[in-house]
Image (spheres, helix red, strand yellow):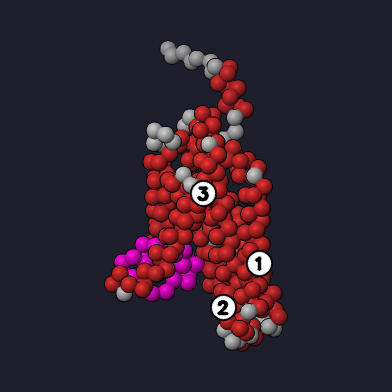
């Protein structure tokens, strides 16, 4: 017959009073005015970017809204989500990097000895925040596209097609993935600045791979996150097209690589 030992009162009290790692990280993220402001800025930036695209069309493309196809109007507005992603990258890098710059990471490690919990808490919190921002930014950009279309005399039904809604939904993957890469980069390099540089470097490599010829592009481009994002959004061209399954697998692989690198660094002897 086995006996069960009653839980230690202190341990039980700690488990009841201590928030989960995700909840604790969410509190940290929202407790800093800079990060809160950047989250608001991210959504506002999406709206401003979409509006600027529409207002500057006569200069940048030599055409007015009325001369654009519905898909072009919608696609131009969705660029606002990309702008929001850059603000989210900064939020993610600050959330991790600031603890290293202030030395608060050592307090965190003392209060939460499990480094896996710390890593998971930060990456999940950053990812969920980026997801929320991405969804809000996409909604704002869709509304901007509908309003822009209305000024050109277009019915909303011409803009809100299955393909356009897929474009909006797929674009949300960008802030989520690059925010996780930024947080992981801040863990690896223990720096906010280098955390920001990490996803931007990945983005740049994907953007310039085509400059090195079709042979290089055919190998590198499908492996980059931009191909997965564009495949999800239905906007992939050339070597970017890897299909929905390939896109999901690519995103999972990139997140896994980022989390693995961050875990390796965090589990170092000196954190």
The image quadrant where one finds the N terminus is: top left
**Mark 2 crowdedness (10 Å alpha carbons): few <14, some 14-19, many ≥20:** some
How far across and how far down the image is residue 236, in percent?
44, 71
* Residue carrying label 2: 71
Secondary structure beneath label 3: helix
Specify which label sits upstream in the sequence, 1 or 2: 1
In whole angstroms, how far apart are the C-alphas of marks 1 and 2? 18 Å
CA distance separating discs 2 and 3: 38 Å
Find residue 155 and report its image quarter.
bottom right
Q: Is residue 239 left or right of residue 81?
A: left
Using the image, tell me which numbered label, if any, was put on residue 192: 3
Residue 30: give x, y in percent of width and height: 64, 45
Question: Toward the viewer: 107 or 175?
Answer: 107
User: What residue is shown at x 58% (from left), y 58% (from top)?
Assistant: 87
- Which residue matches tag 1? 47
SS at mark 2?
A: helix
The structure residue drawn at horizontal position 61% and vertical position 83%, both measured from the top left corner, is 59
Visible in this render: residue 162?
no
Instruction: Identify the residue shown where x is 39% and y is 50%.
Output: 257
């Amino acid at each position: 017959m086995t006996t069960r030992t009653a839980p230690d009162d202190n341990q039980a009290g700690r488990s009841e009073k201590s928030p989960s790692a995700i909840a604790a990280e969410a509190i940290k993220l929202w407790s800093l005015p800079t990060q809160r402001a950047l989250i608001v800025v991210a959504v506002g930036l999406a709206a401003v970017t979409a509006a600027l695209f529409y207002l500057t069309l006569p200069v940048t493309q030599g055409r007015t809204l009325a001369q654009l196809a519905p898909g072009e109007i919608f696609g131009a507005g969705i660029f606002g989500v990309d702008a929001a992603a850059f603000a989210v990258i900064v939020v993610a890098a600050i959330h991790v990097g600031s603890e290293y710059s202030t030395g608060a990471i050592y307090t965190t490690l003392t209060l939460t000895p499990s480094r896996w919990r710390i890593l998971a808490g930060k990456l999940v919190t950053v990812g969920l925040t980026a997801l929320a921002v991405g969804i809000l930014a996409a909604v704002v950009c869709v509304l901007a596209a509908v309003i822009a279309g209305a000024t050109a005399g277009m019915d909303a039904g011409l803009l809100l097609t299955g393909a356009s809604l897929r474009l909006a939904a797929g674009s949300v993957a960008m802030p989520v993935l690059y925010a996780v890469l930024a947080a992981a980069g801040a863990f690896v390099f223990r720096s906010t600045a280098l955390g920001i540089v990490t996803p931007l470097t990945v983005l740049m490599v994907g953007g310039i791979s085509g400059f090195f010829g079709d042979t290089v592009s055919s190998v590198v481009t499908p492996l980059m996150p931009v191909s997965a994002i564009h495949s999800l959004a239905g906007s992939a061209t050339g070597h970017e097209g890897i299909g929905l399954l390939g896109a999901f697998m690519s995103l999972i692989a990139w997140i896994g690589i980022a989390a693995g690198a961050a875990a390796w660094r965090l589990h170092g002897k000196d954190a």
